[in-house]
Image (spheres, rainbow, N blue to C red):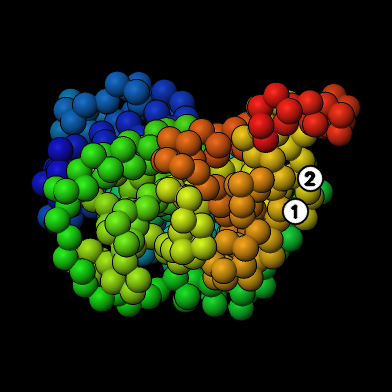
Amino acid sequence: MDRLTMTPAEQLVAVMTRIYESRLTTPSGGNLSVLDEDGSLWVTPSQIDKGRLTAAHMVQIHADGSWKRDGKPTSEWPFHRAVLQARPDCRAVVHAHPTSLVAFSVVGKPLALDQFPDLCRWANRVGFAPYAIPGSQKLGQVLGEVFATGCDATLMENHGAVACGRELMEAFHRFEALEHLASILLAGARLGGLRARSASEMRDAVARMDRAWERVDVDGASQSAQRTALADSVRRAHARGLLGSRTGAFSSRCGDGLLIAPDSADNAELRAGDLVYVEGDRSETGRPPNAMVGLHQAIYDAHPGVRSVATALPAYLMAFAASGVAFDTRTIPEAYIFLKSVLTLPFAARFDGELVAEVLHDKAPVALIESACAVVTGESPFAVFDRLEVAEFTARSILDSAAIGGLKPMSDGVLQEICRVYGC
């Protein structure tokens, strides 16, 4: 269904389904709201399975606070109203209890936006709201005060998190991005903590993502099979947690240019027709491509044999990318065969595609960029997807191994034997 034609009730169902299926809430947890044009507030219901919602379950609360007696709105709807009154530029609120944000919530630790500009660009500031009982007038007052300071989201002490947006999908994307960031920070804590970026570095990085593009017209029908394969790989990578809804990108070489998703595209719903053809400083119909496209272009220019590239921010790989701890692939044969040697480049490489391309080759198809992304190359979108998932599995296994004794890497003799057999 086209989101532009969805009713408020249908929007609530679609987004809560995304939240539940992404494991960002439980069947009974979380609630959403959308402010309608007539001033009424549409909210998710109370005590109905979040994995089984329909539009008929949604409750319309009128400006005077009344609703039809056959509906039962979430008990927390008053704080939704308070948030939207504090942020008149916004028309939607998302609240849920995902595990990583809850971890910060229960220890009383604010979420700092001083890492990963490609991820944090979607939120201006994150607050921290002191505890108040769910559904109470006090909670609405507390959250209203926090959002009135200009926050796009806030942690709620011993409760969870809330995000607002100009429309429901923006609020959801912010919420998801913050849970992603929290997951990276928690993984990085197991490596001793991450290296924070300065405020100026963060501002400069976000500013450099905004580029002007000239127009190039393309016959998309002639690229149909290639577009379909790329879009399928993107959706699959998102489903596996390798791409966020708005973070990370896959591309494939196409003629004299490349195919990639447009900036701000939702990777979970990307279709072949959404992709953008980019050639030099020109993009299909002038649409801005994904903000990481410069890295992709530099790699294709330097390596004619590379047919596909991914720049992604999966949580466990990013813990290594921002902690300064070397990522050791000598875990199991598959990891070494697929990944070989993985270097971590300085943050400045985020906007230095030539430097990134210089360290990539047949014996080093993957690189990490501090506080930015993992860069993965291959001969097809599927090969890149496979290699990226192997890398993330490897990163997680190394982090998990620390709880029972730590990694004992394969010996040089074992690695030489692997390469004799598999040609690596």
Q: Secondary structure at mark 2?
A: loop
Q: Nearer the viewer, residue 41 or 311?
A: 311
Left or right? Give the position of 105 relative to 98: right
Residue occupying the point 54% across, 67% down: 353
Q: Which mark is residue 323?
A: 1
Q: Is the residue 265 above or below the residue 283 in the image?
A: above
Pointer 2 local density, CA inside 10 Å: few below 14, some 14–19, many at least 20 = some
Residue occupying the point 44% across, 70% down: 209
Q: Which residue is mark 2?
A: 191
Q: Nearer the viewer, residue 257 or 130?
A: 257
Residue occupying the point 15% across, 43% down: 2
Callout 1–callout 2 Cβ contact below 8 Å: yes
Question: Where does the image place residue 336, in percent across and percent down from the top left?
Answer: 70, 34
First reached walking from the N terminus: tag 1 or tag 2: 2
Q: Amino acid at mark 1?
A: Ser
Quadrant holding the N terminus: top left
Question: Where does the image place residue 105, in percent across and percent down from the top left?
Answer: 62, 44
Residue occupying the point 14% across, 56% down: 219
